[in-house]
Every structure is written in C-alpha cells, then in structure tokens.
C-alpha cells in the first residue's frame, strides 16, 4: 500500500493517480490496478445518488460508502471527503467527524474544501491528531451557490493571487496534498511549483503532480461529465448491449441453457 511518505516523495519524480470510487465492486477492480489513491468523494451525491449537487451528502453516507470501498480495496490508500457542514462549523467538530471516518472505515486520510479560518485550524488539529489531510481549492463543489455555479476559478489576477496564498496556507497548516479543481493550467502549474506538497489536478491542466477523475465520468457511465473529462471507456454502451442481449436471450428461451442450470 502507498504511504503518505511514498506519495509525497513522488513530487517532481512521478505523476500520482487518484480515482473516485463509491462501491466495493468497483473498488475491487481498482485494487488490481496501480492507481495510487482511491477517493471516496462526496461527488457520490451527484454521481451515485443522482442529486443536483453534493450538498445533501451526510457523514453517515460517506462512512457507508467508504466502508464498502475499504472492503473492496484492502490494499489501497483511501481518502474520504468530509461532506458539507461536517468541516465548516468548528475545528473541534471537524476533528470528531474526521476521527469517526478514520475509525469506522479504515481510510488513510480525509479531504476538505477551502482555506477559511475554520478549515485551516481544522487542518492543524487533524494533522496534530495524526489524521492526514488533503486540501481542495479552485472550484470547491460545496460552495457551488456562492461561486454561482460550476465555473473555472482564479481567472483574474486577484483570484489567482488568493488561490496561491490559500494553497500556501493549507500547506503550512499541515495538508499533505492539495486537489486543484477547475483552475487555469498556468496557475495550477505555478502553485504546484510553489508548494512542497503534491498537487492533484482535476480540470487544472498537466502541470500538477498528479490527476484525479470521477470514476463514472472516465468510464463513460455519467452523461453530464464536464469538458475536462476524458472518457477512457464507454461502459454505458457496453452495459446497454449486454442488457439488450440478455433480454433477447431470455425472450427466445436461449438463456438459461443447460450450462447455466442445475
Ligand atoms: O468529490 C469528489 O469526487 C472530489 C473530486 C472531484 C476531487 O472532490
């Protein structure tokens, strides 16, 4: 299994790969690959639950999915998102919530969004308590309303400066890795060079230390995938064909045959 030290040592040496996953079955498939980090993202709210955004996802739901993923992928470094309102109230509450995730799921790290006062204090408290933390800047889905929708962040000089400052504050607070979502490639590259910790990009260009994609997006299962997603498979078509074949065979009496009967 990857360790925090091994992951950090990959900065400037080898690109890091991360994929989201929400089920034991898919986690077991990913467990057979060389992907370094599995992220139980609160994107499960949109991708798995079919909701409009991630805001309604609960801590219990995150734990439920993270337990499934750990069962499927016993050998992987697993990070779990702190869902909306589990890390915004106070550092004490964030610590208790992150502790619950780590204790009940066997995950290796948690991820939280933003770099406001409570978040920075939370990163310090979690790190001091022995919980590795991944930061998340740029487009932060839990702030979708205040950001007025799914938009690239850090486009103007002031916003770019703030993003860079926030990244440094998160690093100083103890974050061991930083996800940069939907930021201009040039800016994400500059932030990556300015930090000692690895950055993981999603819609943030090739200058980051690694990349993350949402599993259903890259496997071709999610119709609403954003422009930055590359589809590495077309499972939607594969599954449709399989289901159509199954229906046809049942209707024609071709399935089950003797090989599939007792
Ligand atoms: O929730 C999630 O899946 C994420 C990734 C998109 C980075 O935060």
Image: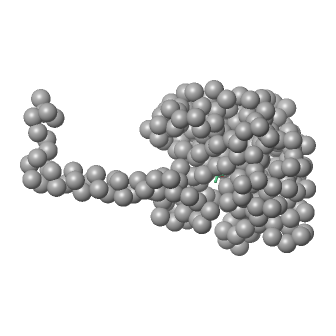
Q: Where residue 120 sits in the image (x, y, percent)?
A: 86, 47
The N terminus sits in image quarter = top right
| Rendering coords of residue 86 (x, y %) | 70, 48
Which quadrant holds the C terminus? top left
Left/right placement of residue 152 relative to residue 49 reads right
Most foreground residue, 10 or 118: 10
What colouring style does the render use? one colour
Asked whether residue 94 is in view, the answer is no
Q: Residue most toward the front?
A: 13
Left or right for 163, reference 108 = right
The reply to whether residue 190 is visible in this rendering is yes
The residue depicted at 64 percent of the width and 43 percent of the height is 17
- Residue 71: percent from the left, percent from the top? 50, 30
Query: What is the tally of numbered marks visible in this picture?
Result: 0
Figure quadrant of residue 14: top right
- Residue at 53% across, 35% down: 33
Residue toward you, 202 or 128: 202
Indicate left or right for 255 with 187 as reference.
Answer: left
For image coordinates 85% across by 72% down, the residue present is 156
Q: Nearer the viewer, residue 95 or 111?
A: 111
Residue positioned 64% across, 33% down in the render = 77
Q: Position of residue 191 (x, y in %)?
A: 85, 54
């Amino acid at each position: 299994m990857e360790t925090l030290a091994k992951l950090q040592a990959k900065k400037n040496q080898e690109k890091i790969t991360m994929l989201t996953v929400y089920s034991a079955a898919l986690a077991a498939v990913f467990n057979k690959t060389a992907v370094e980090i599995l992220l139980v993202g609160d994107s499960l709210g949109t991708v798995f639950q079919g909701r409009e955004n991630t805001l309604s996802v609960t801590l219990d739901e995150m734990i439920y999915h993270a337990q499934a993923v750990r069962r499927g992928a016993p050998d992987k470094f697993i990070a779990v998102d702190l869902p909306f309102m589990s890390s915004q109230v106070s550092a004490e509450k964030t610590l208790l919530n992150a502790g619950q995730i780590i204790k009940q799921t066997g995950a290796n790290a948690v991820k939280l969004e933003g770099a406001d006062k409570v978040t920075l204090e939370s990163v310090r408290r979690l790190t001091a308590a022995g919980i590795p933390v991944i930061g998340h800047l740029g487009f932060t889905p839990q702030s979708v309303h205040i950001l007025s929708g799914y938009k690239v962040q850090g486009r103007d000089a002031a916003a770019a400066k703030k993003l860079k400052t926030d990244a440094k504050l998160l690093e100083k607070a103890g974050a061991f890795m930083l996800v940069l979502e939907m930021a201009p490639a040039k800016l994400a590259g500059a932030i990556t060079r300015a930090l000692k910790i690895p950055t993981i990009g999603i819609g943030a260009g090739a200058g980051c230390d690694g990349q993350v994609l949402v599993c259903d997006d890259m496997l071709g299962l999610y119709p609403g995938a954003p422009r930055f997603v590359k589809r590495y498979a077309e499972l939607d078509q594969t599954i449709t064909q399989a289901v159509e074949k199954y229906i046809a065979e049942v209707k024609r009496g071709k399935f089950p045959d003797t090989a599939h009967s007792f």
